[in-house]
Amino acid sequence: LGISKIDFLFNISYDLVHPVNTILSLSETLSHKQEFNKEEILKDLNNIKYEGALMLDSVNNIVDVSMSNEEVHNNEYKVNDLIEKIQTDIKIKIDKKPIKFSIQTDDIVSASLIGDYDKVEKILFNVLNNAVKYTEVGNIKFKVSATNDKDIQNVKFEISDTGIGIKDEIKETIFNDSISTDNKNLSIGLMLTKKLVDELGGTITFNSTYKV
């Protein structure tokens, strides 16, 4: 990964400390309540569930980083299988959020592709999962398009959302190995995503407007 041990441990701890602290704080508050209001309890429990999910994502990304290798396994896979897997996983992440998740696949996209299915699926899941994290209401759109170059089809995945966006001051470092405590939109998942994209010989770019 090209990440120093200190930076790597910092990134891990940053992704885990916040949800752990939130879960402990909410649990402590609930345990000391003498009068219980159903709406307040449900709100606290939903927050605990949300923070727990964030922590699980971070742990999964840590496992992925530790097991990751640069070897690419190019095999034939069905585009529909990939889309169905992504759709199922992201709908679970959206849960009860008032978010509409839509998928568009251009007719030109081949029914089957040659590539590393596992790496492609992980890249798409990480980016879409990030969209879910930072979108409270609105929509998330996932588009698959392609261009043909002789016998090669180049596939383009586009993801857009109505989330909070990314601050201008951290845009240049969003995929960096190191993050600072000011970069609250970043996680080890984005570092892994950039690594996987590079391994596949692809590119990843973004446009974003931060919403105060």
Image: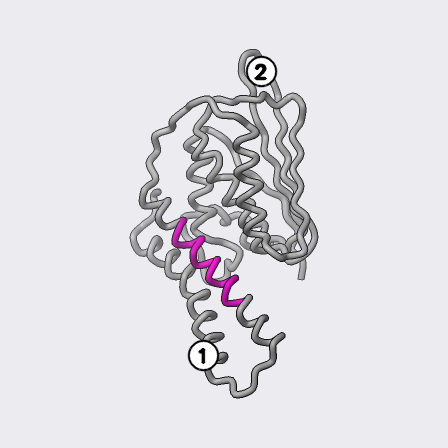
Measuring 49% from the left and 74% from the top, which residue is drawn there? 26
Give the x, y percent position of residue 205.
56, 39
Residue furthest out toward the top: 150
Q: Main secondary structure of the magenta part?
A: helix
Residue furthest out toward the left: 5
Residue furthest out toward the bottom: 34
Q: Name the foreground residue: 141 vs 176.
A: 141
Residue range of the region highlighted in magenta in the rendering = 47-60
| Tag 2 secondary structure | strand
Q: Nearer the viewer, mark 1 or mark 2?
A: 1
Amino acid at circle 1: Glu
Give the x, y percent position of residue 186.
49, 54
Whichever of callouts 1 and 2 sits on the residue coming sooner in the sequence is: 1
CB-based contact (under 8 Å), mark 1 and mark 2: no
Q: CA distance from mark 1 to mark 2?
A: 60 Å
Give the x, y percent position of residue 4.
31, 50
Give the x, y percent position of residue 51.
49, 63
Measuring 46% from the left and 62% from the top, which residue is drawn there? 52
How crowded is the residue under tag 2: few (<14 C-alpha within 10 Å), some, or many (20+)? few
Q: Is residue 67 left or right of residue 188?
A: left
- Residue 178, above or below 80: below
Measuring 46% from the left and 81% from the top, which residue is drawn there? 31
Q: Is residue 155 left or right of residue 5?
A: right
Q: Name the foreground residue: 152 vs 94.
A: 94
Does the stretch in magenta take in 127?
A: no
Residue at numbered disc 2? 149
Which quarter of the image is occupied by the C terminus?
Answer: bottom right
Amino acid at circle 2: Asp
| Tag 1 secondary structure | helix
Measuring 49% from the left and 80% from the top, which residue is drawn there? 29
Residue 28's disc is 1
